[in-house]
Amino acid sequence: MIPYIARKNITHRPLNALLSLVLLSAGVAIISLLILLSERVRRQFEANLEGIDMVMGAKGSPLQLILSAIYQIDAPTGNIRLSEALPWMQQRLVEQAIPLAYGDSYAGYRIVGTTPSYWEHYGASISQGRAFSEDFEAVVGAVAAQRLGLSLGSTFLSVHGISEEGEAHEHPYRVVGILSPTGKVVDNLILCSLESVWHIHAHALEDDTAREITAVLFKFRSPMPLVQWPRQVAEKTQMQLVSPAVEVNRLLSLIGVGIEALTWLGWAIVALAALSVFVALYRALEERRYELALMRAMGASRGQVVQLLVCESLWLCLAGYVAGLLLSRAGLWAISQAAEREFRLSLEQYGFRWMQEGSLLLAILMVGLLAALIPAWKAYRMNIAQTLQYA
């Protein structure tokens, strides 16, 4: 009965509750969205990083090299000669070296020249068709195939760069295989042989020095190259060898500072919402003193009056929490669409986070209890006779 009356009191004065609901939902939405984004971004970065010890590429920004070679979300630092990279790739301490060559795309999806070991590294397998065996045969990631409407036997023309409106090459690619979904970067790529990339850019295959690649992904048999090779490569070649773990940790630490700042902003808004709830309840108490005193005179206990005010506060907080969760999911959808469009990075993951968002619910309800504390205490100490006499 008391929760029903509390809900009716809120709807009877909608303008008094509106500001509290707006502030609460905004604060909860910011905090919830940051919980979802930070978890998803970190998982995406860590999942694609697994099993890659070092990345070799042209000298330039180490972070740019990592973003372009592993996550495919930036322009490469340049190309390197295959003849210069091969001596390092063939060292006995190297367990696996995966070459990458790119510079073209189709409808905004990057075309990568590589070997089958690339998709095998990410746990993908051929779900339809077969691996490429000849020039201009393509194996397409699961998401790319679905978004582009590509199936076995489909043909398409690549364009230079990653713009959808670049200059198209004359020789078409033909789809011979489609990969199983992995949730990793390979899902959004079109893969072909290194020779396909070289041919389409008119490199002379007879001359090894003319063959260029963009990067090499290394996995080592021992930790020794991690310490010694970066300095040796930098001193002896025009290339660089970068640790992706170091660069990604640096990037995530920078992102973490921004997320922490926005989280504090969210809690500041929640604090303002708590103040708004307190003011609304306090004003309601002053306006309804006669009504509350009459309830007491008709048999309601002090505890029931206190429960009524506390329930009003908790209803407001619960409504703000639910609205905030809905707003956070809408925000995540919008950000995910932008990330998918610009970076081919999927961030969609709308499930409820029981640990983080459950704790957030408890915190919001605690805020509601604190906001109702003073009005409830005043209602508890109300002098019934005096209130009715001067009403």
Image (tube, rainbow, N blue to C red):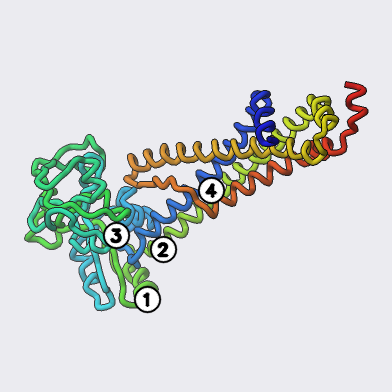
Q: Around disc 2, counting alpha carbons within 10 Å, would you say few (fewer than 14), some (14 to 19), or many (20 or more)?
A: some
Question: In x, y percent, where is residue 248?
Answer: 42, 58
Label 1, secondary structure: give it. Answer: loop
**Which mark is in front, 4 or 3?**
4
What amino acid type should be assigned to the residue bearing mark 1? Pro
Residue in the image at 21% along x and 64% along y: 117
Question: In x, y percent, where is residue 343?
Answer: 34, 44
- Image quarter of residue 51: bottom left
Q: Around disc 3, counting alpha carbons within 10 Å, would you say few (fewer than 14), some (14 to 19), or many (20 or more)?
A: many
Q: CA distance from mark 4 to mark 3?
A: 31 Å
Residue in the image at 49% along x and 40% along y: 328
N-term-proximal mark, 1 vs 3:
3
381 displayed left or right of 102: right
Q: Please name whichever residue, 382 or 143, is drawn nearer the observer in this view of the structure.
A: 382
Check disc 1 and report the residue beneath it: 223
Q: CA distance from mark 2 to mark 4?
A: 20 Å
Q: CA distance from mark 1 to mark 4?
A: 33 Å
**Which mark is in front, 1 or 3?**
1
Q: CA distance from mark 2 to mark 1?
A: 14 Å
Check disc 2 and report the residue beneath it: 245
Label 3, secondary structure: give it. Answer: strand
**Which mark is in front, 3 or 2?**
2
